C-alpha cells in the first residue's frame, strides 16, 4: 500500500488508529481456548468488529513466536485474513528486526514475501547495511525505531554523541539512504514533547506512535506536536483495545474502546 492510499484512508475514516494484536492466551476469553486456533479466532473477531474504526493493524510477532509453530501459523492466518478481507488496511509486522545484510534480506523476505505485510519495524542499531535489504522492497515500508516509548529510551537514544542526540542522528542519517521515501519512524506517545523537534527533521514521514492507553501517552499531545497537514501519524493501542473485556462481549468492548479513540481523532481532524 502506498502512503497516499493510507492518507486517503485516514481522511475517509477520520481515523489514524492502529490496533495492536498482541495476543496473550492468558488474557483472552477462556471459552476461545476450546477452538483449534484461539489466537486467530480472537484476532478475526477483533478485526471484524473494529475494521471501520482503524486504518492499520500491528501484530507484535513476540506474542506469536512465544507459542512456537502454532503461534506462527496464527500469525500467518491473521495476515492472510487481513489482506483478503480488508485490503484497504495497512499492516505492520512489529518484529523489530535488523542484522548483517544477508540476514536482514531473509527477515525482509519473511515479512514482505512470505507473509505479505505492508511494513515491518526495524532497529537501526546495526546501521545502513542492516536496513537496506528492507528498503529494497520498494512497494513496502520500513519502520525504523527512533525514540521508543519505554524508560530505556533514555539509556542510549537521547544520549548526546558529538553534539547530537542519537535518535536525531538516526533520523538525519537514514534520510540519505536509498529508497528512504519508504521509511517511517517509531516515536513513543510517552515522548510527545520531543515531537516538534522530530518533525523539524522528518516533516513529511509517517510516524508510528505506540504508547497511548496502557502506557499512559496522550493522544492530544501527540497530535499537537506530531501531526502534519496530511496527518502522517499512526497511533497504536494494543492492550487498551483488545482486552477491554475478557468475556463473550470482548469484540464489542474492543470496538467501543477503539471508537472512543477514533472519535477523539475525528474531533482533532475536524478542528484542524
Ligand atoms: O514498535 C513498537 O510498536 C513499539 C515501540 C515502542 O517504542 N513502544 C511500544 O510499546 N511498541 C509496541 O507497541 C505495542 C504497545 O502496546 P500497548 O502498550 O499494549 O498499547 C507493543 O506491541 C509494543 O511492543
Image (spheres, grey):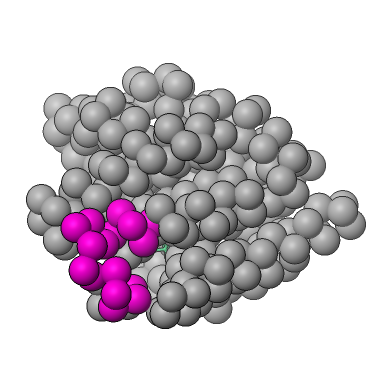
Residue 269's x, y, as percent?
A: 81, 53
The quadrant of the picture showing ligand 1 is: bottom left
> In the picture provided, is 213 more to the left or to the right than 110?
right
User: Mainly helix, strand or loop, the magenta region?
Assistant: helix
Q: At 24% across and 50% down in the image, what residue appears? A: 74
Residue 163's x, y, as percent?
A: 49, 55
Q: At 75% across and 63% down in the image, what residue appears? A: 263
Q: Is residue 201 visible?
A: no
Q: At 40% across and 67% down in the image, what residue appears? A: 153
Q: Is residue 235 magenta?
A: no
Asked if 75 appears above or below 127 in the picture, the reply is below
> In the picture provided, is 110 more to the left or to the right than 225?
left
Q: Quadrant of residue 206?
A: top right
Give the magenta part as a residue range: 28-43
Asked if 239 appears above or below 52 in the picture, the reply is below
Q: Quadrant of residue 116?
A: top left
Asked if 147 appears above or below 77 in the picture, the reply is below
Towards the viewer: 185 or 210: 210
Residue 149's x, y, as percent?
A: 46, 67
Amino acid at each position: 500500500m502506498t502512503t497516499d492510499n493510507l492518507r486517503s484512508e485516514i481522511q475517509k475514516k477520520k481515523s489514524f488508529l492502529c490496533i495492536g494484536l498482541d495476543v496473550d492466551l492468558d488474557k483472552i476469553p477462556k471459552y476461545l481456548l476450546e477452538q483449534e486456533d484461539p489466537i486467530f479466532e480472537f484476532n478475526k473477531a477483533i478485526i471484524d468488529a473494529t475494521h471501520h474504526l482503524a486504518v492499520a493493524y500491528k501484530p507484535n510477532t513476540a506474542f506469536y513466536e512465544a507459542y512456537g509453530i502454532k503461534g506462527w501459523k496464527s500469525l500467518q492466518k491473521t495476515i492472510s485474513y487481513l489482506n483478503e478481507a480488508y485490503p484497504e488496511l495497512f499492516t505492520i509486522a512489529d518484529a523489530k528486526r535488523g542484522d548483517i545484510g544477508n540476514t536482514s534480506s531473509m527477515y525482509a523476505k519473511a515479512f514482505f514475501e512470505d507473509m505479505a505485510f505492508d511494513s515491518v519495524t526495524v532497529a537501526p542499531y546495526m546501521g545502513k547495511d542492516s536496513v537496506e535489504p528492507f528498503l529494497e522492497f520498494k512497494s513496502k515500508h520500513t519502520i525504523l525505531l527512533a525514540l521508543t516509548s519505554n524508560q530505556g529510551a533514555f539509556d542510549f537514544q537521547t544520549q548526546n554523541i558529538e553534539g547530537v542526540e542519537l535518535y536525531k542522528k538516526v533520523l538525519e542519517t537514514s534520510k540519505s539512504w536509498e529508497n528512504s521515501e519508504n521509511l517511517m519512524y517509531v516515536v513513543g506517545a510517552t515522548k510527545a514533547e520531543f515531537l516538534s523537534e522530530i518533525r523539524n527533521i522528518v516533516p513529511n514521514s509517517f510516524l508510528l506512535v505506540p504508547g497511548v492507553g496502557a502506557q499512559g501517552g496522550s493522544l492530544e499531545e501527540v497530535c499537537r506536536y506530531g501531526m502534519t497537514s496530511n496527518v502522517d501519524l499512526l497511533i497504536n493501542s494494543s492492550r487498551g483495545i483488545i482486552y477491554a473485556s475478557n468475556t463473550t462481549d470482548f469484540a464489542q468492548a474492543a470496538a467501543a474502546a477503539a471508537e472512543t479513540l477514533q472519535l477523539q481523532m475525528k474531533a482533532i481532524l475536524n478542528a484542524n
